[in-house]
Amino acid sequence: MKRFGSATWNGDLREGKGSVSTESRALENYPYSFFTRYGEKPGTNPEELLGAAHAACFTMSFVRMLGMASFVPEQVNSKSDAAKIPDIDRGRFQSIASNAKAWCPASKLMNTEIGFEATLDAG
C-alpha cells in the first residue's frame, strides 16, 4: 500500500508560507511556516509531523505484537512513557516494545538512507 503526503511553499524562507496535505485529506493545505517551526505561530512543522507519524506507526506495531503475544492493552499512549496493559511483566513488555520499534516502518525509515532524484520544470 502506498500513501503520499505533499507540501507546497510560496516565497522566501522567513516571510514565505507553506502548506502540507495527505492523500487521505486528514491534513489538507495545513499551514506551516518559518514561525511555526522556529516560533510560536499556529500551524505545524516537519519535526512535529515526523513525531506524529512515528508515534502512530510505533503504536500500531506495538499493539499488533502485543496481540500476537495474547495481550490486549487497555490503552497505549506513545507520547508519554506509560502504557497500561493488564497482566504483563516488565521484561515481556520491554521485549515486545523493542520488537515493535524494530518492525515499525517509520522507525526503519528514520534509520535508512533516502534515495533522491530532482527534476526542474523550466517551463
Image (cartoon, rainbow, N blue to C red):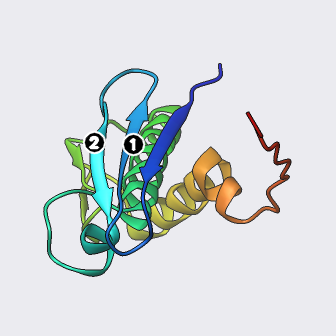
Name the image quarter holding residue 33. bottom left
For marks 1 and 2, give the CA distance. 5 Å
- Mark 1 lies on a secondary structure that is strand
**Circle 2 crowding by C-alpha within 10 Å: few under 14, some 14–19, many from 20:** some
Against 23, is 29 above or below? below
The answer to which of 22 and 62 lies nearer the viewer is 22
> Are circles 1 and 2 on residues that touch, CB within 8 Å?
yes
Horizontally, residue 60 falls left or right of residue 74, namely: right
The answer to which of 89 and 65 lies nearer the viewer is 65
**Which residue shows up at 58% across the image and 58% down it?**
101
The answer to which of 84 and 7 lies nearer the viewer is 7
Percent of width and height locating residue 104: 60, 48
Q: Is residue 78 visible?
A: no
Q: Which mark is residue 30?
A: 2
Horizontally, residue 100 falls left or right of residue 75, namely: right
Name the image quarter holding residue 55. bottom left
Q: Which mark is residue 20?
A: 1
Percent of width and height locating residue 90: 40, 69
**Circle 1 crowding by C-alpha within 10 Å: few under 14, some 14–19, many from 20:** many
Percent of width and height locating residue 60: 44, 39
**Which residue shows up at 45% across the image and 33% down it?**
67
Horizontally, residue 44 falls left or right of residue 107, namely: left
Q: Which mark is residue 119?
A: none
